[in-house]
Amino acid sequence: MTEAYGPGPAETMSRDERAALQLTRLRELVDRLVRADGVQGGRLRAAGVTGGEDVALADLPKLPFTTKQDLWDSYPGGMLTVPMRDVVAVHGSSGSRGRPTLVAYTRGDLELWAEMCARSLVCAGAGPGSVVHNAYGYGLFTGGLGIHQGAIALGATVVPMSGGMTERQVRLLADLRPDILTCTPSYAVRLGEAAREAGVELNLKAGLFGSEPWSEELRGTIEGLLGLAALDIYGLSEVIGPGVATECLERDGLHVNEDHFLVEAIGEDGSPVPEGTPGELVFTTTREAMPLLRYRTGDIASLTTAPCPCGRTLVRMSKVLGRRDDMLVVRGVNVYPREIEAVLLRHASPHYQVIVDRRETMPRLIVACEEADAGLEQVLSAELGLSCDVRVLPSGTVPRVEIGKAVRVVTWESGEAPLPGL
């Protein structure tokens, strides 16, 4: 029997209480960065900041940014603010030229990360007694181990499946009867279809699905397949991993754990955007091994301080609308892949791929899917203002995701077609 758990004191404190805590932690961070005298400390000094007492919360938008390029330029350990002997784990994500974006963790960082992932599981209704089927990948990728240690910290039972081996996953979903599923949204579709084909009755109550931007339409598909509440979880290794922000069962925005991660949304010029306006997410972290001041994520979302019925007073972020660098510009029209998905899943199969065909001087967009309503081209044109070619392919043509993230957008430069039948 799962014990009922709810939001903790740090998630329900008043805005004034949280602001006081944030100011203390921001000043401690600035002191550490200045003392470390690395890239971030040098930029602070150049901005006239000699220590934490020089800054207030209102000064945050005036402080220098950190970017992924800084991490690449400092590879592998130039951003550390602790001795290497204090680093107990390293994780990372893909980077340019085959070089990963590496991040380091102290023992205290791992404890914080576990606490954040435990909060995320509580948002999904989990507690001691829950069984968490964890199908995120394990390894350098932070998804699997993040949720794993969060489940243990919560007192839940974790099934460390990782990705792939779908038949075995379905068997354990049937035998162990987990109430919580964690994986990418694309793999959730794969598991749901496989369970349905096998005639397996599931016991799932909620799922935490992240690592890929996904639409409300895909939420409906997942909930229909798996019979659960599909919740979004957000994180990135540079900030800490999964657990930075999570939807609660109200499903109306992701609660950002802003007692540890200060969040901003900025426009193209780097200045703050009004509440409710989409902008690039910027995070300031308090982790020990590799703290980051105003890290530009490239993810586009909006923020709101409106109250949530769940009782959490944390700022909420919308689902990620896209990335600053993944906007498609085709024949003068700007569109994010997520906007295309939102239309597709109302009129087509969840198994699709968007191909930007650049073999000619003027690029065109091809939407390849396995099932589609008649007139989909006209629907896409009317809703997105974008003309495209729709290709309906035989079932099984679009690759199913077993491990890792779904590849939803590909570019066709030359040579063979990205998918058979194009």
Image (cartoon, helix red, strand yellow):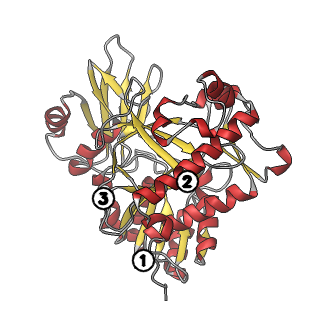
User: Is mark 3 in CB contact (under 8 Å) with mark 2?
Assistant: no
Which residue is found at the position 82% from the left and 50% from the top? 86
Residue at image coords 60%, 24%? 48
How many numbered discs? 3
Q: Residue furthest top?
A: 361
Please state which amino acid type lies under the numbered disc 2: His
Q: Residues within 10 Å of mark 1 (few under 14, many from 20)?
A: some
Which residue occupies the foreground of this view, 316 or 402?
A: 316
Task: Give the amino acid at mark 3.
Answer: Asp
Q: Residues within 10 Å of mark 2 (few under 14, many from 20)?
A: many
Instruction: Please state the horizontal and vertical placement of residue 45, each as a whole percent of the image.
Output: 65, 25
Which residue position holds label 2? 260
Q: Provide the secondary structure element on which disc 1 rests.
A: loop
Position of residue 313 measured from the top left corner of the image (x, y, whole percent): 38, 61
Residue that numbered label 1 is attached to: 200
Checking the image for residue 252, the label placed there is 3
Q: Nearer the viewer, residue 420 or 155?
A: 155
Of 347 and 81, nearer the camera is 81
Sequence order check, earlier mark of 3 and 2? 3
Q: Is residue 354 above or below residue 413?
A: below
* Of marks 2 and 1, the one in the foreground: 2
Image quarter where the C terminus lies is top left
Question: Judging from the image, what secondary structure is the residue with disc 3 in?
Answer: loop
Callout 2 touching callout 1 (CB < 8 Å)? no
Given the image, on which type of amino acid does mark 1 rest? Val
Indicate which disc residue 162 carries. Answer: none
The percent position of residue 239, horizontal first and vertical second, equals 58, 46
Residue 187 position within the rendered picture, expressed as x and y whole percent measured from the top left:
46, 56
State which tag comes first along the sequence, 3 or 1: 1
Query: Disc 3 and disc 2: Cα gap in Å?
Result: 21 Å
Which quarter of the picture shows residue 271?
top left
